[in-house]
Image: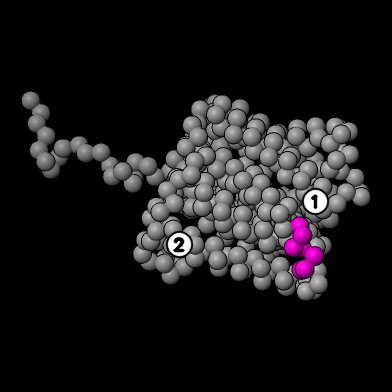
Amino acid sequence: MNTLTPSNRLTPPPAENRLAPVRQIVWAAWIIMLLVSMLPNIIFTELFKQATPWLFWAKLGLLAVLIGVSYFWHVLTPLRKYLWVLAAIFGVEYLVATGTQLLVPWQRLFGGLGASFSAQMLGTQLQRFIVSLLIIGVMFLLGYRAPQFFLTRGDMRAPTRPIPWLGIKKSESWLRFGRNFAFFISLGTLIFLIIGGRPSLESLGRALPLLPLVLLFASLNAFNEEMTYRASLLAPLENVVGYKHALGITAAFFGLGHFYGVPYGLVGVAMATFLGWLLGKAMLETRGFCWSWLIHFLQDVLIFSFMAIGSIVPGG
């Protein structure tokens, strides 16, 4: 009879090792994100001065091929839901944009060269809201429950993970951490907007009557972007590539998407990447949507206020 002593008894590896992502899978997740992000568009536009409408179809085609390959190649199999979500984002955004362009009543209300900021922005945010609702539907079809893709309030007082590279070596409540970082990030956004837009005091005064609409647009945009570009991607990534890589991938994807947005350029990419990292951290640690939405909302209030007075435009 073979008896196992304490010294030779087989024991499972530590939980950290069992859950550690396979290096190939992590590399694949990063490479896929970079290939379908705005990075190829930036390279072709800025370095080669080429128009890039074909890149949309190239990215969608690549994702379709990778989804097919995921049924045969073990490296991509754990990333299949991640691939489906990326393909859904591209496909749904295209279908909604194309559909609304073909609707004459929609164009009369929200389109046209003479449309006001309020009309154009309302049309844009309604489009994105439709996309967000469809992405929520996709998440349910993929087998996720609402809390699994962070469509819940979450624990507003959850403990934070320390951030040694920011000098934060101890855990603290998200109630305190979120409040402090919301203030400092909003201050950074405001400084960027003032330097980039250089508004006059008179123009700032013109923004006050538009404040109710700005608040509406900011609340919608924060929800739309957090659901479409963060919650939907963190859900399939977290348990496959781990906390750190899930944060990094979604933050980089979000940041690269702002090269032609607001904030814009390389500075905008850096700012949006850090913000995306922080908002993803909030989602993962509170297991909910609330802190991410709130911090994002505050940035959008500032950005849309400056856009409303024509002080700043996407892409600079």
Q: Which residue is mark 2?
A: 177
The location of residue 143, given as percent across then percent down, is 51, 27
Marks 2 and 1, the one that precedes in the sequence:
1
What residue lies at 37% left-to-right and 61% top-to-bottom? Answer: 171
Secondary structure category for the residue under label 1:
helix
On screen, residue 287 versus residue 131, left or right, reads left
Residue 311 location, quadrant: bottom right
Query: Which mark is on residue 118?
Result: 1
Asked whether 248 or 186 is in front, the reply is: 186
Q: Residue at x 65, y 32 (%)?
A: 134
Q: Which residues are magenta?
A: 204-210
Q: Is residue 104 left or right of residue 256?
A: right
Tell me the amino acid under the disc marked 1: Ser
Magenta residues, dominant SS class? helix
Query: In the figure, is residue 203 to the left or right of 301?
Result: right
- Name the disc covering residue 28, or none: none
Q: Is residue 284 magenta?
A: no
Residue closer to the observer: 14 or 214: 214
Question: Eyeballing the image, is 140 above or below 303?
Answer: above
Position of 305 with respect to 32 (left or right) is: right
Q: For the residue marked with disc 2, what is the amino acid?
A: Phe
Circles 2, 1 touching at the beta carbon (< 8 Å) = no
x and y percentages locating residue 120 in the rendered image = 81, 48
Rendered-image quadrant of the C terminus: bottom right
Question: Is residue 123 placed above or below 260 in the rendered structure?
Answer: above
Residue 246 appears in the picture as rendered: no
**Residue 235 locus on image (x, y percent):** 51, 39
Position of residue 75 measured from the top left corner of the image (x, y, whole percent): 50, 36
Mark 2 is surrounded, within 10 Å at the Cα level, by few (under 14), some (14 to 19) or many (20 or more) other residues, namely some
**Residue visible at 39% across and 52% down in the picture:** 158
